[in-house]
Amino acid sequence: MLARRNPQLNAHGELIHLLSTEGLPRDILTHILDTAAQFVSVSDREVKKVPLLRGKSVFNLFFENSTRTRTTFDIAATRLSADVYTLDIARSSTAKGESLLDTVANLSAMAADIFVVRHSESGAPYLLAQHVAPHVHVVNAGDGRHAHPTQGLLDMYTIRHYKKDFSNLTVAIVGDVLHSRVARSDIHALTTLGAAEVRVVGPRTLVPGDFGPMGVRVCHTLEEGIKDADVIIMLRLQNERMSGALLPSSQEFFKSFGLTPEKLRWAKPDAIVMHPGPINRGVEIDSHVVDGRQSVILPQVTFGIAVRMAVLSIVAGNEA
Ligand code: CP
């Protein structure tokens, strides 16, 4: 029987689309992080540009709201000298019922080279990757609750920046794991990169036992979950993806799983605190932690530019 090819890789094993961190080999993950490291300094230059994607057209298609991902993809493509077009979905013909595939076919007729896609339907970027021409690349900017691979990669970049070696690390992912595409992308990347222990932490309604087979430890108290952790990744409560009452109230959630300065003492003294944003202060995390010395939440955003530059240049085959 023929093995099914990873749709993100070409026949030579090169990354041509970025759809998920799941199934990406360790050498590709590491190559993306190493390439991003080369791009960090571009942001410090007077002229913040390199010519790697000159003449290429990058189309941003965000069918869900975004502040960080959309803006940093825009900055990343601009710093690579690409022409960047961000479709205003609310004013586009999507509102008249045009399908995703027809939208992309028409934008492809305008000579698109890369589509960056965020969509509420899990799998939408996979569908596009199956339908675009061979020279066109698709980058997933978040699909449903399935995957957010560039967030996963910028999280790995941030962890590597502060902690160097994954093999000694205990990483706790806390909160609404059930609805989180970030959690899934982080778990796949962390296990591939060899993190010593990955824990998912939260109430049973938001952290069901079936995460266990992903190679993580499931914890239902914050103390057990973050005890002696090196890295704590807090997640937003994704009320927009919850059907029915999964929590008594956000105050109850904060009491049990909200990260406060007092509870942060359960982790290692040099633990770093991360959050993909947007943050609900006082719901999943206390403001003193967000703005405290262990928080690396804003550096995550900054590293996102270099990581997205790396992803765009690698899938296009135009690397530094
Ligand atoms: N982390 C993240 O995806 O944030 P945005 O929704 O603002 O892009």
Image (cartoon, helix red, strand yellow):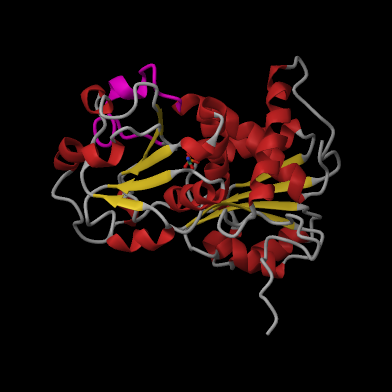
* Residue 295, magenta (yes or no): yes
Q: Quadrant of the N terminus?
A: bottom right
Q: Quadrant of residue 9?
A: bottom right
Residue closest to the eye, 20 or 161: 161
Residue at the extreme bottom: 1
| Residue 67 against residue 56 in the figure, above or below | above
Chief SS of the magenta region: loop
> Along the horizontal axis of the image, is 134 left or right of 228?
right
Residue 109 locus on image (x, y percent)? 79, 61
Residue at the image point whose x is 23% and y is 28% from the top:
263
Q: Reply yes or no: does residue 31 show up in magenta.
A: no
Residue situated in front as seen by the camera: 308 or 153 = 153
Is residue 49 depicted above or below 216 in this figure?
above
Residue 138 placed where, x, y %? 68, 56
Q: Using the image, determine if residue 178 lies above or below residue 251.
A: below
Give the magenta part as a residue range: 278-296
Say which residue appears at 72% left-offset and 36% top-offset. Answer: 35
| Residue 278, x across and y down, in percent | 40, 36
Task: Let me know if residue 235 appears in the view.
Answer: no
Count of residue discs: 0
From where the camera sits, is residue 241 visible?
yes
Taking 217 as reference, is 71 left or right? Answer: right
Q: Measured from the top left, where is residue 236 in percent x and y?
A: 34, 42
- Residue at image location 18% in from the left, 57% down from the top: 245
What residue lies at 80% left-to-right and 34% top-to-bottom? Answer: 81
